[in-house]
Image: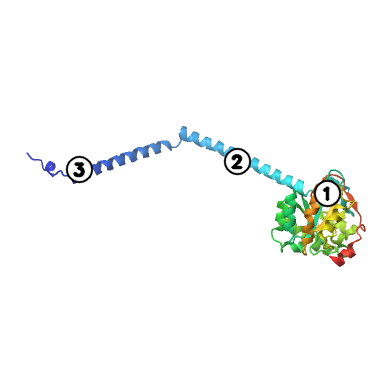
Amino acid sequence: MPDGRITKRTPARDAAIRRRRRGVLVVIGGLIVLVALVYAFRPGDSGSAAEQSLTSQSAIDRAAEKAAKGALEGAKAADAVEQRLWSIGQFANKVPAGDGVNSGTGAGNSVALTFDDGPGQQTWDVLALLKRYRMHATFFVIGQNIANNPGALAAIVADGHVVGDHTWSHASLPSLNAAGLKTEIGDTQAAIQKETGHNLTIMRPPFGDFTEKTNEWVRSRGMMPILWTIDSNDWALHDSRTIANNILNSPALKPGAIILLHDGTMNRQVTVNALPMILDGLVARGLRSVTVPELLRMGPPSIARPGDYKLSDYAKATN
Ligand SMILES: [Zn+2]
């Protein structure tokens, strides 16, 4: 007897049956996955999921411990930079409050090149030359020049050099009252500290003009007045060879010497041109330039008394 269902069987109907079977298989497969997931994440189980969670916690603890240690080492490294670059150390205590520093200790082979009146256009050239010779220097900065030379202070500090206070507008200190000292020295100190993130420890009186009273004021702000041992006269000269010779032929060129140069406020190309000769000369004499704080930490400095620097009137007329 003929079966209607059998007689109705066609390739199209077979395909429909295969699709249904595939659909059933997909549903069964999905259920198996679902059951496995429910089993794996069932609550209150002391099996693999809980162990995995414990492991993760200890890994978190180890990572946190490592990070805390890293942060501590980072803080120690920052302290080390503060100590190495900015601290003037215990020997500074030997300088009477009314006096300043004329030179560092004569020990070792270190001198200190210092650049005043910047930052300025030539600061970048000075930095490039110091880097080439792997020497370090100190920059006594004028407050009002900072904003006009964006990035200069950061570049100075990034290269391992140190910044000092040289007043806001290159003022002669003895004529200033307390309010004037605060504006000229205090505001510059604050501006540099804000820009560099370091506490200033050194200050240079413009024109070498200072009294016991101004020195005491500078010391009360946590800074040491730093004068110089050798004046290159680069502020008055137009010949680079003479500037270099003023340093290299000076009888004062020996370990501990603090050397005065300029990198800002006016065009200092003549100083930039002299610098390779100066640096070559230091190398030839077995000397190296370090920062003033570094020099001061090597031993007791020699002292600059008020009235020791007589060039100020000439400097004022020329600079
Ligand atoms: Zn100056």
Residue at which label 2 appears: 64
Q: Quadrant of residue 62?
A: top right
In this orientation, does residue 141 appear?
Answer: no
Q: Quadrant of ligand 1?
A: bottom right
Which three-letter amino acid code belongs to the residue tagged 2?
A: Ala
Which three-letter amino acid code belongs to the residue tagged 3?
A: Asp
Is residue 76 placed above or below 140 in the rendered structure? above
Quadrant (top left/top right/bottom left/bottom right) for the C terminus: bottom right
Tag 2 secondary structure:
helix
Tag 3 secondary structure:
helix
Q: Nearer the viewer, residue 277 or 261?
A: 277
Determine whether the beta carbon of the residue marked 2 sits less than 8 angstroms from the nearest atom of ligand 1.
Answer: no
Q: Are marks 3 and 1 in contact (CB under 8 Å)?
A: no
Residue at which label 3 appears: 14
In front: label 3 or label 1 = 1
Q: Nearer the viewer, residue 29 or 166?
A: 166
Residue at which label 1 appears: 111
In this orientation, does residue 102 appear?
Answer: yes
Between marks 3 and 2, how big is the CA–CA gap? 63 Å
